[in-house]
Amino acid sequence: MKKFVSMLLATVVSAGCLVLGTSCKPKSNVVKEPKTINVKLYKAGFGDEFLMEFQDKFNAAFKDEGYVFNISSALYDNAGDAMLQEMYAGYEEYGIDLYITGAIAPNQVSEIGLYGDKGDLCIDLRESVFNQPAINYDGTYTSEKISDRIHEDLVPFLCADNGKMYGFTWAQTSAGMVVNTKKLATYGITELPRTSNELFEAFDTILAQSSTTLTYPLTYTLDNGATYQNTAMSMWFAQFGVDTYNEFLRLQTKNPDGSWTDMANGYEVYDNPHLVDAFEAGYRLLDKKYAAAGSNGQLLDQAQALIMKEADGSNNAVFMLNGDWFLNEVKANYKNSLNQIEFMNVPVISALGVEVFGAGTKYALDDATCDDVLSLLCKLADEGKSIAEMKAGVASTFNVTLDDADVQRIAEARGTCFARGIEHLAFIPKGCTKVDIVAKALRMMASDDFANTFMAKANAASPYTKNISVESTYKFVNEAKDLVAHEYFRPINSRISNLRFAAFQTDFFLPHVANSSLTSTLITENSSKSYRELAQDLIASARAEAEKKWNNYKK
């Protein structure tokens, strides 16, 4: 393990990711009172309205106790690196009691992180927060612990390899696809794609007219939004099985009791045939022919503009890989167009339908029928139908009787959701003298009341509740909310949650592929191979390099 950690730290240091003395802003608006907690926020796409309202609610709920939630407004918009440097400098230096941030992983604040010479930089929140009930805006407690309100699949991303739970997640932040349905309808497509084949059929329909309309299927960006493309590849792999997907990220095998065992040879995760299926679809998705002109050179706001603008004979697009934060980012500039965009989950990969229902199975359906069955099951799952009802729907439409386990597998694939909120965590720094008060604030952020504030102000869902009573005026927001409340919801993320994997990574690893080899290969168009052949080459190269690194690290 020490070899893995040392290799990881050497990589981080050489990349210059976290250098002390950079990006830190001076102390400002810090109130040195024993009952005032000073909070620093990284706004990202959520803005700060939600936290301003929360501040008022917290202060009102604890007025008698004299507790005050103080947002250090002059310290907004600091990236995670700067906040991590402040934690390292020490609580006494900056006086911040709570960091609400992005781009900091639990391992980075642990004693095995880059700044491990100071031990833990943050405190373990398991007992003070997660094993306590949430707190409502009126100061009352919920009947269940916070640990019972969050999906179990998210918990590993809050913990470091030493088992301590440093991170508190406060946003679900689902990634998926943005669709301009007004444009889509002009092609006679009135239902959003539910399978990858349906998605590509829509792409081809749009592309057939692109030379004259200058409306293209897709727009994307290769700046920091390039990770949006990654969500589709991750989803298409995870839809074959979330546990297998997580085993890939952890280089560990999940045991029946929920514990994890280290793999003897981690590079063997590349032998999973579904990786090829996922990347085959990925290569097709990002084929340059589908993209609006200039996509590979755009900034994020430019890509978003191509979705929001009218199909007026100038360069524009219908689809974009993005997330539920999209509306919040464009609402100021496109107030009159917000009702023509919708949010959809990444369609279920059609290869899953073939695997479950196709040739070689007891059903022996042809590929086209497999996709039709897959699409219907996804539709019924979205409507909250039970497994029995989904079976009945397929039986009446296709005269095919499915096994419960096969229907369940498709339902869970449809409910799989890429949760980017896990990349936005809150931390209480070591040395904080007001832990009890800060813990109360975090517990309040796990309530249904906060969920409604977050939905109303940030147009995003909370990871702690499905009981969001706020109904948005925008269909986009309600669709994103419904995704979290999906009957078969299972969240995933591509953040590396395990140091063994982080030390073992290559440019070909799944969480980084949209920023490296996959996208660059597509843009340069330097291959005449099929999408599947490109995917096979990618996986073979990744496995070879992974095996080489693995054997080197084990020496």
Image (spheres, rainbow, N blue to C red):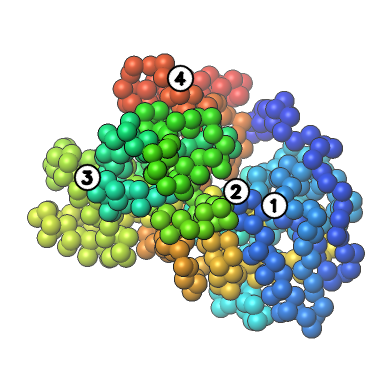
Between the C-alphas of marks 2 and 4, the distance is 31 Å
What's the residue at 27%, 46% (across, down)? 187
Task: Identify the residue at horizontal 67%, vertical 70% (top origin).
Answer: 53
Q: Position of residue 127 (x, y in %)?
A: 67, 64
Judge depth for marks 3 and 4 and give the one in front. Answer: 4
Mark 2 against mark 4, which lies toward the viewer? Answer: 4
Point out residue 157 in the picture as x, y percentages from the top left corner. 58, 49
Label 4 amino acid?
Thr
x, y (%) of residue 140?
64, 81
Judged from this view, the residue extending furthest toward the front is 312
Residue 460 or residue 509, whichever sits in front? 460
Residue that mark 3 sits on: 371
Image-based side of 520 in relation to 431, left or right: left
Judge the density around disc 1: few (<14), some (14-19), many (≥20) Cα neighbours within 10 Å. Answer: many
Q: Answer yes or no: do the residues labelled 3 and 4 have beta carbons within 8 Å?
A: no
Q: Earlier in the sequence, mark 1 or mark 3?
A: 1
Marking on residue 423: 2
Q: Which amino acid type is marked by label 3?
A: Asp
**In terms of sequence position, does the residue under pointer 2 or pointer 4 come before the other?**
2
Measure the C-alpha gap from mark 2 to mark 3: 33 Å
- Quadrant of the image containing the C terminus: top right
Q: Is residue 46 visible?
A: yes
**Real-space Cα separation, disc 3 to disc 4, in angstroms:** 32 Å
Q: Which element type, helix, strand or loop, lies under badge 1?
A: loop
Q: The residue tagged with tag 3: helix, strand or loop?
A: helix
In front of the other: 411 or 81: 81
Q: Nearer the viewer, residue 101 or 503?
A: 101
Q: Which residue is mark 4?
A: 524
Q: Earlier in the sequence, mark 2 or mark 3?
A: 3
- What residue did someone put label 1 on? 42
